[in-house]
Amino acid sequence: MIPLDRGRLLGIDHGTKVIGLAVCDATWIAARPFGLITRRSRESDFARIAAIIAEQRVAAIVLGMPETPPDFKGISQASTVRRWAKRLGSAVRLPVYPWDESLSTFEAESIAAELGQRVRGRIDDRAAAVILQSFIDAHPPGTPLPEPLNQQGD
């Protein structure tokens, strides 16, 4: 487990067309949707993420990880996201913590419905906020953090 001083976190919902972003405060109390990045190229996407990291003074990244079915053969979405995360972590020089993204879009839609909010278009930034809030809730002060993806061996 890697210790991390509290600081702002950037939550990412990785998609093939859009990257959803969320941020939290430095005390890890509340996550909020931050915005969307329409995918162009890895270099362009990483540059835009790096600019947000600098602007928001982000200390670490929480990346939603898809699950791979146990009997899956071939290259899974999880392995694609894991490879992307390691490259992102190297590019921005921050730890990238994996976190389960299961049902994050469904939960984001449910929260919006409960609040009476009508969602138009993409909801990936809200899904990123769900992922980030789940990570925050699971890691109160003093709780060990998982090993960052970009510090794990292959």
Image (cartoon, rainbow, N blue to C red):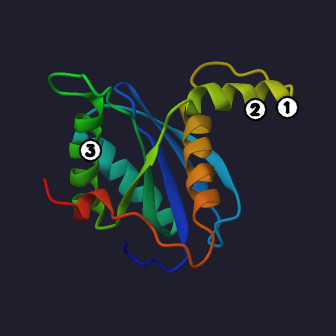
Label 3 amino acid? Answer: Arg
The answer to which of 85 and 151 lies nearer the viewer is 151
Task: From the viewer's perspective, tell me whether residue 37 is left or right of residue 136.
Answer: left
Binning the other alpha carbons within 10 Å of mark 1 as few (below 14), some (14 to 19) or many (20 upward) gives few
Element under label 2? helix
Looking at this view, is 126 or 1 the one in front? 1
- Contact, CB < 8 Å: mark 1 with mark 2? yes
Q: How many marks?
A: 3
The residue located at (61%, 42%) in the rendering is 130
The residue carrying mark 2 is 111
Q: Which label's residue is closer to the chain start, 2 or 3?
A: 3
Q: Earlier in the sequence, mark 1 or mark 3?
A: 3
What residue is at 37 percent from the left and 33 percent from the top?
67
Q: Position of residue 151 (x, y in %)?
A: 23, 65
Amino acid type, residue under disc 1 in the picture:
Leu
Which residue extends farthest front?
A: 71
- As measured in the structure, the alpha-carbon distance from the residue carrying label 1 to the one carrying label 3 is 33 Å
Asked if one can make out residue 49 in the rendered structure from this viewpoint, the answer is: yes
Q: Is residue 34 visible?
A: no
Percent position (x, y) of residue 120? 67, 19
Query: Camera-side residue: 69 or 25?
Result: 69
Q: Nearer the viewer, residue 80 or 141?
A: 141
Badge 3 marks a residue whose secondary structure is helix
* Percent position of residue 24, x then y: 62, 59
Q: Is residue 40 left or right of residue 66?
A: left
Kindly identify which residue carries mark 1: 115
Q: Residues within 10 Å of mark 3 (few under 14, many from 20)?
A: many
Q: Which quadrant, please, contains the N terminus?
A: bottom left
Figure check: 140 above or below 113: below
| Image quarter of residue 73 | top left
Q: Which residue is mark 3?
A: 82
